[in-house]
Image (cartoon, rainbow, N blue to C red):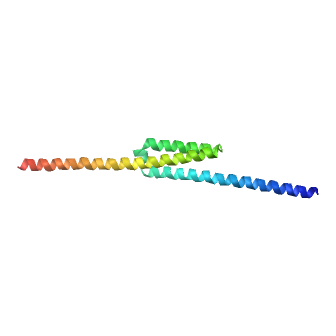
Amino acid sequence: MDYRLFRTLLFVTSVAFFLAFGSARAQSSADSSAISAAEQALFAAREAGADRWAPRALSDAQAAFDAALELQFKRKRSSAEHMAKRAERLAVLATVQARYTELKDAVDRKATENAGLRRQLLMGQGGSW
C-alpha cells in the first residue's frame, strides 16, 4: 500500500513539475520573441543609418533594449516584455526618423543645386541681352 502511495505521489509531483516547467518555457519563448523583435528593429534602424541621422532615438531604443535584457535576466518577464516592445517601437521610430532626415537632406541638396543652376541660367541670359 505504501508503494502505491509513493508511486501516486511521484506521478503527481512529476506532472506538477512538467506543467510548471512547460508554462515557464512558454512564457520564456514569448519574452524571447519580443526581445528578438526588438533586436531586429534595432538592426533595421542601424541599417537605415539611424546612428547618423537619428542618434538620439537610436540611443533611446538601445537603452530600452538593454533594460529589457536586464529585466529578463532578473526574471521579471512581464516588465521585460513591455520594455522589449517599447524598445522595438523606439527602434522603428529611429528608422523612420533616419529615413525622413536622409530624404529631407537629399531634397535640400537638390533644391540648392537647382537654385544654383537657375542663377547660372539667368545670369547667362541676362549678360547676353
Query: In x, y percent, where is residue 83?
Result: 56, 44
In the rendered view, does 21 fall on the left or right side of 101?
A: right
Residue occupying the point 57% across, 46% down: 82
Q: How many marks?
A: 0
Where is residue 14? Give x, y as percent. Answer: 79, 55
For image coordinates 92% across by 57% down, the residue present is 3
Considering every residue shown, the one lying at the far left of the view is 129
Position of 127 with respect to 8 (left or right) is left
Q: Residue at x 31, y 50 (%)?
A: 106
Q: In which quadrant of the rendered image does the N terminus lie?
A: bottom right
Q: Nearer the viewer, residue 6 or 119?
A: 6
Left or right of 54: which side holds 65? Answer: right
16 relative to 104 in the view: left or right? right
Q: Position of residue 45 (x, y in %)?
A: 46, 50
* Residue 1, above or below 97: below
Q: Residue at x 90, y 56 (%)?
A: 5
